[in-house]
Amino acid sequence: MGNQDTPLLEARDVTVRFGKVTALDGLDLTAPPGEVLAILGPNGAGKTTFVRTVATLQRPTSGELRVRGHDVVRDAMAVRRDIGLAGQFAAVEPTMTGRENLEMTARLFGHGRRAARQAADAVIDQLGLGEVADRRSGAYSGGQRRRLDLGASLVGAPRLLLLDEPTTGLDPTGRREVWDAVRGLAANGTDILLTTHYLDEADELADHVVVIDHGRAVASGTISDLKASVGRDVIEVAVADPARLDAAAGVLERVTSAPPRLDRGSRRATAPAAGGPGELGAVIRSLDDAGVSVDEIGLRRPTLDEVFLALTGGDAGLPDTTARATNGSTR
Amino acid sequence: MTIEALTHPHVPVRKSAITRPATPPGAARVSLEVARRALRKYFRTPGLFVMGVVQSVLFLFTFRYVFGGAIQGGSAQYVAFFVPGYVATIVLFTGGGIAVAVAEDRASGFTGRLLSLPVPRSAIVAGRALADVTTNAWSILATAAFGFAFGFRLSGSVTDGLAAFGLCLVYGVVFTMVFMVIGLISPNSQAAQGMSMIAFVFAFISSTYVPAASMPGWLQPFAKYQPITPMVDAVRSLLTGSHSDVGLALAWSALLLVVFTPVAVLRYRRG
């Protein structure tokens, strides 16, 4: 039982190797209690390995990891009593009803029969699963199954909820359902660690974000901290004629001396404005001189996508097309 | 800490019915819950509990009426030889299902969830064994019933018959451990299925279907000294009123159990 000052998580130089593959490479991280922490990173960055290590499913090859003051290796049982795990694979038994799944997990948390029934009832109520609670979970929609899985991690009233990619593979409605559930839990004081490769998800849910890449923490802070740390505002140009996009990019590169990013679908080119607002005027003049007609041009704060790409070197294999396709509203 | 209205922060807050359990669950409760879930899955999936028996019956039928006539002594005599052997080794045919179920649980995240809970690892293995002993008993009884229908008769006492049944259940526990280990070391369920085929080698190159002495000389040592032969011979001897090989069969069972159970528990401990 940690007291108020004990960090929720404390990782010191945590390394996990699988043969020749290094999944976590000296990860350092401290998270205070009372927060929703998002671990953000591209596929293969080590997010799932980190969650598995916190959940005592994977021993660190070296380094030290404490959960609410309990060491994940020496004091694994104490850690397990504090956590609830819900994963990217919804770990519910499809041949059992939602209620049966919840009661089983409650009993495996240590509840007696009566307390298990009460916990299941409460979770069914809280997650809005009343209508489907007595149906076999194999017949649930993706969002319902994921909420049931989330519910199963709650029946033991964990102090730390671990959510490994809680919305991967869900349609937009399913994502919203899970987000609402997570927000409600956070509002009621459950500490949450979630991993995601969806930037908007971190933006929506997390107080604190740690970006990991190649098994190391490359940045940490609030979302606005992160945006500020990459700092520079971005000049964004939308050209009228898609054929002139390269010309516009050339102008951007000349003025800002930074390689612009192109999005041909939306006919946009963006580049960081190192020189501040003055550069915007220069870009407008140069575009005019070059005879490139512009639909839209402006200076704006970097998006989390851009922050993320800047931090992870941009070659991260980020499934940003998926993120855009499933959530156009944040763009 | 309590968990209250989850749907939205502005929903009126209800008193939560979820408390933190005072103590982690005991081993017995964990085993029972693990077993209950495995049994629900088995008996609620017709492909598992019906098809297992259908497969056994087809096998019995084929050996009794298709191959039986061509085997020395004729099919009526052969039924007395091979039904005990088949019933004793039925777990070698159904065991693939155990390996696949264990591998699927790992892939689906079920095992991960289970291991993240404060449960003793040995209780997970015990629960799985408890479930598989039950499904085995079901396969053995169903197959034995068809064996009687196809003309098999006890020539020993009923007590010996029950002892033979008990021995088959012991084999069930032993091979549950072996197949559990196969499921735990397989990267996926297809591999688990494939690796389980090794059991067929032991089932066929033994005294289950034909006497080991009828095999070519170079094959006989394997057929005679691998564990399935004394295990089958023990069941067969009980069903015909003698008690040979029972001690050897139990010794093999104990040895396999002692080797494979800790491997299974350790694999679960490592996650």
Image (cartoon, coloured by chain):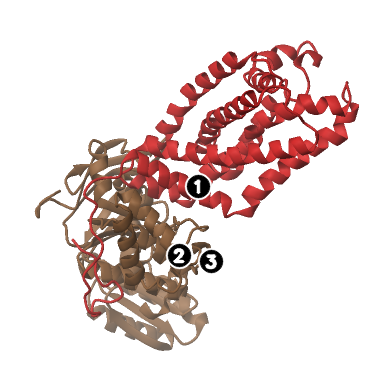
Horizontal and vertical percent position of residue B92? 64, 32
Q: Quadrant of the C terminus of chain A?
A: bottom left
| Quadrant in which residue A247 is drawn | bottom left
Chain of the residue displaying label 1: B
Q: Of discs 2 and 3, which sits in the foreground?
A: 3
Discs 2, 1 touching: Cβ within 8 Å: no
For the colour brown, the matching chain is A
Q: What's under tag 2, amino acid-wise? A: Arg
C-alpha span from label 2 to label 1: 19 Å
Which chain contains the residue that carries disc 3? A
Dot 2 and dot 3 within a common chain:
yes
Would you place residue A174 above or below residue B60 in this image? below
Q: Residues within 10 Å of mark 1 (few under 14, many from 20)?
A: many
For residue A195, which numbered disc appears in the image?
Answer: none
Chain identity of mark 2: A
Residue at the image point whose x is 35% and y is 85% from the top: A297
Q: Amino acid at mark 1?
A: Ala
Q: Residue under label 2, please give it.
A: A145
Q: Colour of chain B?
A: red
- Note whether A226 is above or below B189 in the view shown: below
Report the label total: 3
* Residue B165 or residue A262, whichever sits in front: B165
Instruction: Give percent across and percent down for residue A159.
Output: 22, 56
Amino acid type of disc 3? Answer: Ala
- Is residue B239 rendered to the left or right of residue B163? right
| A188 to the left or right of B128 | left
In this view of the protein, which residue sits in the foreground, A326 or B41?
B41
Dot 3 and dot 1 residues touching (CB under 8 Å): no
Mark 1 — residue? B38
Q: Earlier in the sequence, mark 2 or mark 3?
A: 3
Q: Circle 3 — which element?
A: helix
- Residue named by callout 3: A139
